[in-house]
Amino acid sequence: MLNWIWMGMIVFGVIVAALLDQLTGSNGIVEGMFDMVKVGVVKIVIPLSAVMMLWLGIMRLAEKSGMIQAVSRFVRPVMKRLFPDVPEDHPAMSAMVMNMAANILGLGNAATPLGLKAMQHLDELNPNKGTATNSMCTFLAINTSSVTLIPATAIGLLAAQGIAEPYAIVGTTIGATLCSTIVAIIAVKAFEKMPVFNRETTTFAIKKERENLAKPRVISNFGKVILWLVGLLFIGIIFLEMYPDKRVELQETLGLREIAVQLDAQGASLDESEMEKDKPIWQRAVSAISVAAIPFVLVFFIIFAALKRIPVYEEFVEGAKEGWSVAVRIMPFIVAMLAALAMLRNSGALLLFQNLLKPILEFVHFPTELVPMALMRPLSGSGSQGVLVEILTNEGLSETIKYTAGTMFGSTETTFYVLAVYFGSVAVRKTRHALAAGLTADLAGVIAAVIICKAMFG
């Protein structure tokens, strides 16, 4: 399916570009394509490889120390229903959970490497290499539904443009993402039963993995005390993040205030204090947890592994070595997808779609000002961010439209990019129903965003 869509995007882009005189020039499809593939390698793949090295090293420690199995036990009832083909104690389970947790907290830098690691584990259970399994499609559908608590990027753009109460989209985004996630799960489970997407599966690989799983080691009582102390330490850090004024008082008590001023932290602390006072306590809590989440995971996993006598440095390096090889595997897939997307965008095809859909959307009372966002969001993250900025800076648009655009941006995902990266990491070419489920989730998120924002903001 993806083969035909990719080919169609290129052919249609060239035809439209020829009709609209967009083949050459600074904004033509040729220059746009070359610029986009350069950006894909230099600004996406290479930085992503560095982040992947970090997180794959941490995941190596988690696997060796038995943390993977411990995490899996907590989420086994829900995950078993979503992924019945994956053994309960398989590393893929906890890798998927950690990826979803990172997405919920808005930790994009951590979510992608963890998601790629989960795909590698899922591919270990795949008896038909190169073809997506039901579990892979379900995992991708949930990812493209973009479950998140704090849409930090959208809120930042709203605040930068002087929109009143930018945090007002937090509730609408949560509502829209819940709708898109529910629809994604329903859609992917329905599509996998359709003959056009269905295929035979075997359990040979699953049984093999069950036999090879290592038993988690037992941690000592002293080690448990250390872990509790680490947990209490980060509870204190979260408290300080929620109440910056208290951190300033602690700095003064410990004689650290002068150093903080030298680090130019005084101005930032005062600004943060004023901003935090205007937020509800639950928003401050979520924001603080998001800030402390990555440091906590890094410290907790390393100490957990060290307490089990794992050589943490050597094992981290071994896991990090996988990062570059994964980046090399996904690079061709990203280049191919970005080239097609650039040709489609620069040709004027999206504007053509917008004009064709305008009468239908007006009939169903869908705001036509949001059509560019709805069309661009599944295709390009940077493109959809540019569309959002254009909407926010348009003084002729109501704040309801601007809140809705921010909600759409925060509650949907760049589906084509996600599929290219995740499936490319395990060389899956037959994506089956993953794209259909992802686009269905995107559509549900867009519709939910419009309905919820109309109800909330009028």
Image (cartoon, rainbow, N blue to C red):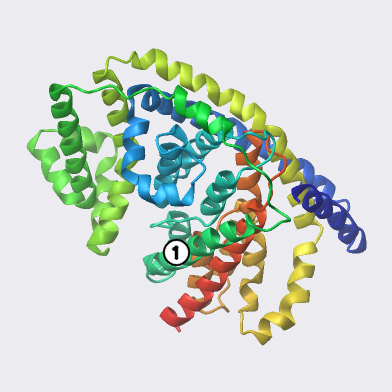
Q: Residues within 10 Å of mark 1 (few under 14, many from 20)?
A: many
Q: Is residue 367 left or right of residue 171?
A: right
Element on which disc 1 rests? helix
Q: Residue at x 25, y 64 (%)?
A: 280
Q: Residue at x 38, y 68 (%)?
A: 171
Single out the residue that lies furthest toward the bottom.
Answer: 363
Residue 398 in the image, given as x and y percentages of width and height? 52, 79
Pick the front one: 373 or 176: 176
Q: Amino acid at mark 1?
A: Leu
Q: Is residue 456 above or below residue 85?
A: below
For the C terminus, the image quarter is: bottom left
Pick the front one: 62 or 83: 83
Residue 113 in the image, given as x and y percentages of width and height? 50, 35
Q: Residue at x 37, y 15 (%)?
A: 313
Q: Residue at x 52, y 50 (%)?
A: 143
Pick the front one: 264 or 10: 10
Q: Is residue 202 left or right of residue 95?
A: right
What residue sits right under mark 1 in the picture?
A: 178
Q: Is residue 85 above or below residue 328?
A: below
